[in-house]
Amino acid sequence: MKEFNRTDYAGALRACDVGRTVTVCGWVQRARRLGGLTFVTLRDRTGLLQLNFNAERDAALSELAGTLRTEFVIGATGVVTHRGESAVNHEMPTGEIELYVTALKVFTRAETTPFEILDDTDCAENLRLKYRYLDLRRQRLQNTIALRHRVAAIARSYFYDNGFLEIETPVLTKSTPEGARDYLVPSRVHPGKFYALPQSPQQYKQLLMLSGFDRYIQIVKCFRDEDLRADRQPEFTQIDLEMSFVDEEDVRAVNEGFLKKLFKEVRGIDLELPLQCMPWKEAMERFGSDKPDLRFGMELCNITDLVGGCGFKVFTDAAETGGVRLINVDGGAKMPRKEIDSLVEFVKTYRAKGLAWIKVNEDGLQSSFSKFMKPEELSAIATRANAKAGDLLLIVADPKDLIVMTALGALRIECAKRLDRIPKDTYKLLWVTDFPMFEWSEEDQRFTAMHHPFTAPKDEDMALLDTDRAHCRAKAYDIVINGYEAGGGSIRIHDPEVQERMFQALGFTKEEAEERFGHLINAFRYGAPPHGGMAYGLDRLVMLMAGTDNIRDVIAFPKIQTAAELMMNSPDVVEQKQLDELSIAINIRSDEV
RNA sequence: GGCCCGGUAGUUCAGCUGGUUAGAACGCUAGCCUGUCACGCUAGAGGUCAUGGGUUCGAGCCCCAUUCGGGUCGCCA
């Protein structure tokens, strides 16, 4: 711009700039008129700066300043000046100085915004999302979006420095049968056929290894047409990478280097390497989760063997095929009955049938099932749980041990939250390893791949691929941070014969496998290097770095729970002409519209 | 698809056991104000109590349905 060409960011000016004539541009945060003296706080992406207008210095200019309203876009030229000693604002980074304005330009006026552009706004989120461009003016979101940029930049520089090539893969690709629901994309030139948006560039990056690219990285959008959560969006970004001639330890080592650099540069935290590794089975038994939060204790305790012969049918039935386990909520005995009842309801949402409890009082044990059990059986449980006076033991029993563990795992976190036992500003990272290859799908009545169908089994479990799928473990690993799955990956199958056995194990006929994955099967016939990799959820990583538990906070234009986007109002209907061109007929009943 | 929570000025909220004209703060508009920075003071405008139906002499409040948001289970290879 010829006029009011910005020389400085407003929020970046300091006392050392005093005496300089500068031009700043931005938005009016606030205008305060005290008669002949007018203060205007100007905001740009770096922060706030106070502009000073004095009628005695320039009456016309002061008059113009008086017309300024919140969110007007202005440019101001003036001299950076020390405030009087008594006028210094210690709350503001620029609080020692102000700009004695000599020229002011109003670029645009602004209507009153639907909500105030303040960091501590408690305005409802749907309104903020409808006016996301205004919400994003808030310093907090400006900082988070800038933080996101830094995380991505650190990832790029680290992996570039370690010989990774950034290679783009297609966004219009092919639907895969396993895994999440695909977003489908029709095309005019292929009536009746659909592209799918990638759930991840998994197959492409493996094929790149086959092509010899050796080390690949991409920061890439992925899409999954599934229900949203506080930490899950249908459109999200992965830091996706793949390496050749590596085993699990190699992949983890490279990624630990990245995490160390990331935590150091973003949060000033020195991570101790190597990170802890915990087999999946141990994570489930100790924490009831495949993404354990290690910031607090309250670990699960197995009492299945103690209750096999007791008089409580709920426990004995569960002990036969499943499990009976508990968590010890230290200091929980003073929890009122009503609150314990709410915990009972809580575990039921995780398919537990109920929650039994023992209160350890000074004068003995009190429990919800004492009439079914001998006192010495009760105290045996308390002893196993290392219970002391004031503790509360919460017990879940079920014929399916997995339900017991996951319900208690969720309960463990719920109790820690309620009792405020989770330390703030600490980070606990670990690898969860040795995931099961398969999990049983009730819906499909067959085994499905827990990770994906290209994941390699553990060498020692290779035989179980055909004989005992329930106990076959994978060369898969997740990086877990503070109870969030921040990323995950695996060593892939590079032997076509093993891949064929894997497809068989998943219940695909040769023909089905050929139809769905023929390109991959073919490619692997021509020399595939051993390879593996992983992918981080960039959004979750930024979320953790920013200290928020809402993924929408770290995405410029996020989607709401229905996967709609409130500002543009997507998705939306399209014109009949567009549908005709795509040979698409809409087939919904009128009561569904 | 299930469960739970919520919707009252532009915004955040209060609104008693169902009872006259629905209030407060912030914001907004106008005026005054020379060291404010959540400026202050004075005055003013601003409401389809989410929508529809029901109960009642009477509904912001009770009931039903719908809708819009949030959390969560299922789902997320």
Image (tube, helix red, strand yellow):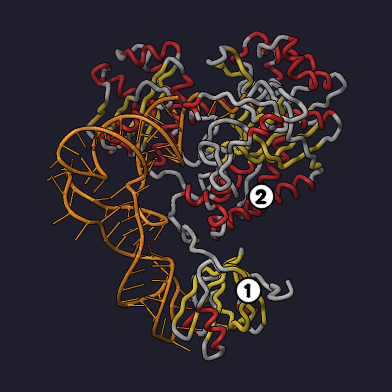
A235 lies left or right of A378: right
Query: Do we see residue A200 in this rendering?
Result: yes
The amino acid at mark 2 is Val
User: Measured from the top left, where is residue A182 in percent x and y?
Assistant: 64, 28
Name the residue tied to disc 2: A151
Name the residue tied to disc 1: A75
Nearest the camera: A552 or A434? A552
User: Measured from the top left, where is residue A223 in percent x and y?
Assistant: 64, 34
Q: Chain of mark 2?
A: A
Number of residues whose C-alpha sits closer than 10 Å to that of mark 1, classed few (under 14), some (14–19) or many (20 or more): many
Relative to A458, does residue A243 appear above or below in the rendering?
Answer: below
- What numbered label is drawn on residue A173? none
Nearest the camera: A315 or A177? A177
| Mark pair 2, 1: CA separation | 32 Å
Relative to A92, does residue A472 appear above or below in the rendering?
Answer: above
A382 lies left or right of A208: left
Determine the image quadrant of residue A9. Answer: bottom right
Relative to A295, does residue A346 appear above or below in the rendering?
Answer: above
Determine the image quadrant of residue A369. Answer: top left
Residues at marks 2 and 1 on the same chain: yes
- Residue depicted at x 73% and y 24%: A191
User: Measured from the top left, where is residue A330 in percent x and y?
Assistant: 36, 37
Which is closer to the viewer, label 2 or label 1?
Answer: 1
A520 lies left or right of A145: right
- Residue depicted at x 74% and y 37%: A241
Relative to A567, does residue A215 appear above or below in the rendering?
Answer: above
Q: How many marks?
A: 2
